[in-house]
Image (tube, rainbow, N blue to C red):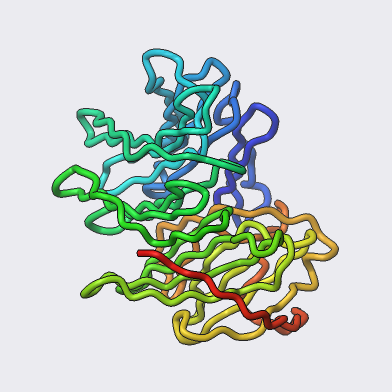
């Protein structure tokens, strides 16, 4: 297992194995501003992208024990947010957000694509942030990229990047409500896209879930997953044929699961261990396909005793009553 983390202004990589004598920590890069991301091609090839304090984007290639850095930007750029990197068929995709100007709450979503010989640059969309700049969610499929993002704090859209056409589609409006929303996560399972986010209701937040199918027009199911309160970072996980949504609230991990791919949901659970430990939200990558597991992020214990929290057996979780409240939520597609 490889653990990549940022400590102060350095990116560190730990190689964790069964033999503790082989475990070691390497300094991969220094002078890091804030954002970085990682993708794994194979056990001996890893890419890391980050922005340094000189405001340049840097691509790091780790091949076997050799580390190489390439400066991607000719001139310094504005600070980047939500920096993402993924690979598909030996091609590199880097997607992030930048503020259009320091005086406005308007941002560009940018995409850089490298085919092995040439970089292609795209401006995917211009977005507006109100209360906060929300993250986008990028998924790589066999023939395309899927990107869900906030067009504004009220509207979530979806775009596709075709690997064959090398172009982005027009945006499809997934959610449009009169109240603000925060956070975003997405999974695609078979023909369904599953979304989760937080929405303000009467001054409080709730975790919401959307299941969408685009076969023959948009089919949409909406569900309120949590009680009203202060939830954050809703995270979707597919594990052992159950769809889980986990989130953080009052420094505890809570979750709910569906056994029928989002048509109905079981009780809310609070994970007892999260009350007494430090935990993080990990990004998870694997090069070995896992049956009945789609896991991009998860809450878990802090290194070195890494253990995911919020899904699986509920033997050590406490059931929380779900308070019923009538709420009408118009959806405009």
Q: Quadrant of residue 94?
A: top left
Q: Quadrant of residue 116?
A: top left
Above-or-below relation of 73 to 307: above
Residue 71 position in % (x across, y down) = 41, 20
Above-or-below relation of 46 to 178: above
Q: Residue at x 47, y 69 (%)?
A: 330
Q: How many marks?
A: 0
Please identify the quadrant where the N terminus is shown: bottom right
Please identify the quadrant where the C terminus is shown: bottom left
Above-or-below relation of 53 to 169: above
Q: Residue at x 37, y 23 (%)?
A: 72
Q: Is residue 239 left or right of residue 252?
A: left
Q: Which one is nearer the viewer's eye here, 266 or 67?
A: 266
Residue 40 position in % (x across, y down) = 42, 47
Q: Which one is nearer the viewer's eye here, 89 or 131?
A: 131
Q: Is residue 30 left or right of residue 125?
A: right
Query: Would residue 170 be visible to someone looking at this image?
Result: yes
Above-or-below relation of 187 to 53: below
Residue 279 position in % (x across, y down) = 73, 56
Query: Would residue 307 be visible to someone looking at this image?
Result: no
Q: Quadrant of residue 121?
A: top left
Q: Residue at x 65, y 27 (%)?
A: 9
Q: Is residue 321 left or right of residue 25?
A: right
Q: Residue at x 40, y 42 (%)?
A: 45
């Amino acid at each position: 297992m490889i653990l990549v983390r940022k400590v102060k202004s350095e990116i560190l990589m730990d190689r964790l194995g069964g033999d503790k004598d082989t475990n070691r920590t390497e300094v991969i890069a220094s002078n890091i501003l804030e954002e970085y991301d990682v993708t794994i091609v194979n056990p001996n090839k890893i890419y890391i992208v980050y922005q340094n304090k000189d405001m340049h984007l840097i691509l790091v290639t780790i091949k076997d024990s050799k580390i190489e850095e390439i400066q991607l930007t000719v001139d310094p750029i504005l600070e980047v947010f939500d920096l993402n990197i993924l690979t598909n068929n030996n091609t590199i995709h880097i997607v992030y957000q930048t503020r259009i100007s320091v005086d406005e709450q308007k941002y560009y979503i940018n995409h850089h694509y490298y085919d092995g010989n040439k970089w292609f640059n795209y401006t995917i969309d211009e977005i507006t942030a109100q209360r906060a700049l929300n993250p986008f969610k990028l998924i790589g499929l066999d023939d395309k990229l899927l990107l869900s993002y906030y067009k504004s704090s009220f509207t979530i859209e979806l775009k596709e990047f075709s690997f064959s056409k090398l172009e982005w589609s027009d945006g499809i409006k997934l959610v449009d409500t009169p109240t603000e929303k925060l956070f975003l996560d997405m999974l695609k399972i078979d023909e369904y896209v599953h979304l989760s986010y937080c929405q303000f209701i009467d001054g409080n937040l709730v975790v919401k879930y959307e299941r969408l199918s685009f076969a023959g027009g948009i089919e949409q199911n909406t569900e309120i997953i949590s009680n009203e309160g202060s939830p954050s970072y809703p995270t979707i996980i597919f594990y052992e044929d159950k769809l889980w949504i986990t989130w953080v609230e009052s420094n505890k991990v809570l979750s709910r699961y569906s056994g029928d791919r989002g048509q109905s949901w079981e009780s809310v659970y609070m994970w007892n261990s999260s009350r007494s430990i430090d935990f993080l939200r990990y990004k998870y990558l694997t090069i070995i396909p896992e049956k009945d597991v789609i896991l991009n992020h998860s809450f878990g214990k802090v290194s070195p005793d890494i253990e995911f929290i919020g899904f699986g057996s509920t033997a050590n979780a406490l059931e929380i009553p779900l308070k019923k409240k009538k709420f009408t939520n118009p959806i405009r597609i």
